[in-house]
Image (tube, grey):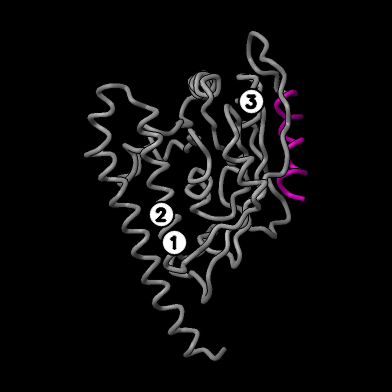
Amino acid sequence: MDAPRRLWIRLPRSVLALFFFLAFGVGGLVLGCILFPPLMLFGAKRAMRALVRGCYKLFVGVGRMTGLFRVVMSTEDRERLTSMRGCVVVASHPSLIDVVILLAYLPNATAVAKAAAGRNFFYSRVVNAAFLVNDNLQRMLDEAQALLSSGVNLVIFPEGTRTPADAPQRKLYRGAAQIALHAGAPIQCVTIACEPPVLAKGQPWWDVADRVITFTLRVCGEIPVAAPEPGTVPHAAAVALTERMRPLLFH
């Protein structure tokens, strides 16, 4: 395809991507400033999580209808996702919207968010109300245990940040393992692939390729975790469990 034709294909897709980003930001303000306050009065955390997931489903649905992106997974993997209850769902992290896509398909779920996300102008209220903010380790572990024991699925990206698929080294943080060990909750590993790569680390938002972006989800296996023991999570146990995730996430 020659350069001028590629430009005229990319330009409307970039405009469409801008619309999605604006809708995401404005939607965060509407949820946090208008819809969440009355729910917070009644402590309706589950309703807030459901509202966020409903918006994410709409986001994914509109992305598919407009041809900007699509999500592909097998029928078996879709069933496995929808049947998960009280699991620590760890996933690879190639793109900025991985959490949006994953939460759109997981029932009664939330995610661990960075402390910086809890200070973002557009969606800080949503993050602080409906997500688990990683700003204090012990509080996060206790809140995660309460959520998991009530059947809520908890999404976490052990890489901590977006990582290219061809990265030579992948550092994994121990937070997911610490949560699973503290709560005695099973770990479910999910791989997310994005082709062509978009919204990767350092990649501009308007670079959304000249064809439909395909996100492929695969449920790669469960790691059972023993019931928690009193006291703090042993460092060695968290390290060992983290390394068990690696071959499932990056095979």
What residue did someone put label 1 on? 63
Which residue is more in the foreground, 76 or 99? 76
Q: Position of residue 141 (x, y in %)?
A: 54, 22
Q: CA distance from mark 3 to mark 2?
A: 30 Å
In magenta stretch: residue 167: no
Among numbered discs 3 and 2, the one appearing first in the sequence: 2
Q: CA distance from mark 2 to mark 1?
A: 6 Å
Say which residue appears at 55% left-offset and 37% top-offset. 155
The amino acid pointed to by label 3 is Ala
What residue did someone put label 2 on? 59
Which residue is more in the foreground, 45 or 171? 45
Q: Which residues are magenta?
A: 236-251
User: In which image quadrant can residue 226 be found?
Assistant: top right
Say which residue appears at 64% left-offset and 40% top-offset. 80
> Where is the N terminus found, in terms of image quarters?
bottom right
Query: Is residue 26 depicted above or below 119 in this figure?
Result: below
What residue did someone put label 3 on? 180
Q: Position of residue 210 (x, y in %)?
A: 51, 76
In magenta stretch: residue 249: yes
- Which structural element holds mark 1? helix
Say which residue appears at 30% left-offset and 49% top-offset. 27
Callout 2: 10 Å neighbours few (<14), some, many (20+)?
some
